[in-house]
Image: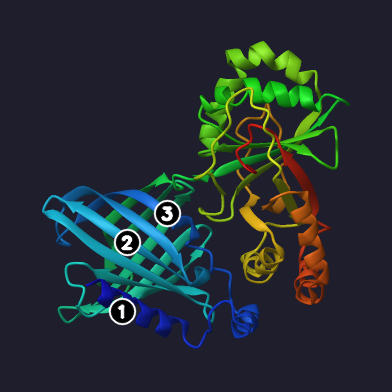
Amino acid sequence: MKSFRVTLAAGILAAAMGSIAPAHSQDTSTQAAAANLTGLRDFDFQVGEWRVHHRVKRPADSLQWSEFEGTCSNRSLMDGWANVEDNMFDKPTGVTRGVGLRAYDPKTGQWAIWWIDGRDPFGALDPPVKGRFDNGVGTFYSDYTNNGKPMRVRFTWSHITPVSARWEQAYSSDAGKTWETNWIMEFRRVSLSSATCCPIVELRQYTLHPGQRDVLVDLFDREFIETQEAEGMKILGQFRDLDNPNRFVWLRGFSDMPGRAQALGAFYGGPTWKAHSKAANATMVDVDNVLLLRPLRPTSGFSLEKLQRLAPGSTDVPKQLVIGTIYYFDESPSNDFIDFFEREVAPLLRDAGASIIGRFVTESSPNTFPALPVREGEQVFVFFSAFRDGAAYERYLAELGRSQRWNDGAAKALSTRIKRPPEILRLSTTARSLVGR
């Protein structure tokens, strides 16, 4: 059974992608540059593990809905040109399985979706539904024949957030004049993965009074990590800016924007901040340099799987260097730019020695905790890279300087796509930082 499914999937993808070569080849780069890539990342939101609540109505003339639970696991294929969705349905009549397979057509900017029913995996495939996303809603159609009668089917994706989504299936027997919904799936993310954090991330850069950075670092590492995490946040990283002795940089993660408001309200209205706010504020000149970010895709956050925070009082400062790179835009970074970065820029950076540990874009939701300002209106693409130490970073820069592909190709193309030269943060981790350990 497993061998059959792999063969079938490969055949479907080959047919959908036509003559497109693997994404790393020169032919793909040339064709992709002229292709319609606006929808290439539309299904990135679904990568990961989900719990699913199903509501199904059968037969079509029945008013009875049955409800049951299930799970869904989605992973990206072929550098994002396709993805596969593995479903388990825990029905009252027993457990069944099904696979959704999707592939992107750069000629039309549409996705095609096939369904493989685990109860009859050798059966003929129905024609794929095809469509695209507009304004956050994905709509996909197909025509087929049922008992000799022409029918039209519609898939709809909506209500998409980092932790939830809704899918509906509807049928029409009158060429789309009227529709009857017969299947609704409500998705809730199990987690971005046990190791990836977080759907919402703050990049906070504080300007401090001269000589006060180590005072704040000691206070932060001693009093403000576990107490913030107890309210539902994740303290991801704390850093000394190597190019500014009066700057403290840190990263804080949240499950979603409503959760952010609740967690911040609980902490800043709680006893820990009341006890230590005077000492903390005495070190600070400006705390408003804050970018509100979200992962480029669900798996683009920080991987925390093998990281363990040191205990309070630890002084073992890691030698690893973290580089934050911020690209600025007039508008939200386009799918075309993101594809360019993933296809052209990131491989060259990795070849030169960078380990890219997180990729983010602006989270455009309104600030849910106005007491802490953020830089609203900024449109950025931010990525973080890790290096073993400062010497490794210098070797990386030298390698890029010698790279003709970088200097004459990707770097020049990059400079024409961004608003101004990138902002580079050279960050040394504190003893209790997770990121950069």
- Whole-Å distance between the Cαs marked 2 and 1? 15 Å
- Picture layout, residue 79 above or below residue 323: below
Residue at x-position 57% and y-position 42%: 200
Measured as percent of width and height from the top left, residue 312 is found at: 60, 23
- Of residue 93 and residue 249, the one placed in the foreground of this image is 249
CB contact under 8 Å: marks 3 and 1: no
- Picture layout, residue 313 above or below residue 11: above
Q: Is residue 206 left or right of residue 5?
A: right
Q: Is residue 224 left or right of residue 127?
A: right
Q: From this viewpoint, is residue 115 visible?
A: yes
Instruction: Name which residue type carries label 1.
Output: Leu
Q: Earlier in the sequence, mark 2 or mark 1?
A: 1
Measured as percent of width and height from the top left, residue 227 is found at: 56, 22
Instruction: Name which residue type carries label 2.
Output: Asp
Q: Which mark is residue 48?
A: 3
CB contact under 8 Å: marks 2 and 1: no
Q: Dot 1 corresponds to which residue? A: 8
For mark 1, does the 10 Å Cα neighbourhood hold few (<14), some (14 to 19), or many (20 or more) residues?
few
Q: From this viewpoint, is residue 174 visible?
A: no
For mark 3, does the 10 Å Cα neighbourhood hold few (<14), some (14 to 19), or many (20 or more) residues?
some
Measured as percent of width and height from the top left, residue 225 is found at: 60, 26
CB contact under 8 Å: marks 3 and 2: no
Q: Which mark is residue 86?
A: 2
- Whole-Å distance between the Cαs marked 3 and 2? 11 Å
Q: Is residue 428 left or right of residue 126?
A: right
Measured as percent of width and height from the top left, residue 66 is found at: 17, 50
